[in-house]
Image: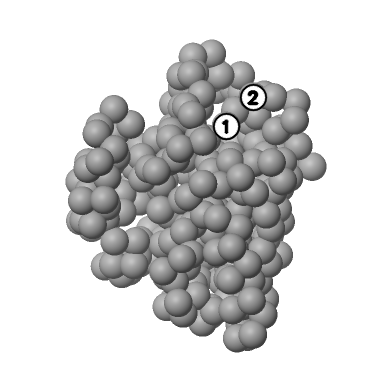
Amino acid sequence: MFTYCFLPSDLHRSESQACVYLYSPTKISPMANEAHPCPCDIGHRLEYGGMGREVQVEHIKAYLTKCPVDTGKAVIVIQDIFGWQLPNTRYMADMIAGNGYTTIVPDFFVGQEPWDPSWDRSTFSEWLKTKDARKIDREVDAVLKYLKQQCHTRKVGVVGFCWGGVAVHHIMMKYPEVRAGVSVYGIVKDSEDVHSLKNPTLFIFAENDAVIPLEQVSLLTQKLKDHCKVEYQIKTFSGQTHGFVHRKREDCSPEDKPYIDEARRNLLEWLNKYV
């Protein structure tokens, strides 16, 4: 069992110190109604400061966390629609860093505003048109170069949530140097060629996801079964909703906690196996 929690009093320790601590959030926004997640609701927004630091990577900013032991391994963590500064995403990046990886959360929106839950939902489609998760090659190239030159990385994996899960699909079809991918509730309905994966990819879905119906997961499963030539795995978590892996507190309910823990453990096991 992995530990993926952090102690607020340790948030400003140096990067050379241990990365894994116990965390108890104190101020959490009320749980959003995930029964209508179009766009998906933000859920539990953690008040978490992070253990990494912000860096400049060519034309974009990024959040970087180094593990105390240099393993030569790194993981690119890709944001959801709420942007690279969402504390929940940085929490997940720090969790991964605590298990042996340099992690980096680039601003794949390149300075544009992330989605704000207070905005009029009727404008979401227009907002999303300017955020194509498959047109990120310039940013991916810059991040891979930075990891290699500045962090001395030899092996790279990628993890993405929601919008970032779609980006993972794209990266795993185009970048053979990325050894493993984990797509967490990434929309698959318009990914016709998603079976053309270059390296092992884990797909994590929620059973009660109004954004990604189970029929789409079944279609993806069949396409990969018929065409995919590399290792892959698809896991759908019973009773869970969109965002459960990183937008729900671990202590949100006794019923949800085992699924959150298992999904995060599966994510780490996949990286450990293939990166």
Comparing 25 with 19, the one in front is 25
Amino acid under label 1? Lys
Comparing 164 with 241, the one in front is 241
For residue 88, side relative to residue 241 (left or right): left
Q: Which residue is mark 2?
A: 252
Q: Is residue 72 visible to the viewer in this orientation of the structure?
A: no
Q: Position of residue 35 (x, y in %)?
A: 51, 36
Q: Is residue 268 above or below residue 87?
A: below
Residue shown at 72% from the left, 46% from the top: 238
Q: Quadrant of residue 147?
A: bottom left
Comparing 225 with 111, the one in front is 225
Amino acid under label 2? Cys
Q: Secondary structure at mark 2?
A: loop
Q: Please, which residue is most extreme toward the right here?
A: 1
Q: Is residue 225 visible to the viewer in this orientation of the structure?
A: yes
Residue shown at 26% from the left, 50% from the top: 125
Check contact, mark 1 vs mark 2: CB within 8 A: yes
Judge the density around disc 1: few (<14), some (14-19), many (≥20) Cα neighbours within 10 Å: many
Q: Position of residue 159 (x, y in %)?
A: 52, 56
Judge the density around disc 2: few (<14), some (14-19), many (≥20) Cα neighbours within 10 Å: few
The quadrant of the picture occupied by the C terminus is: bottom right
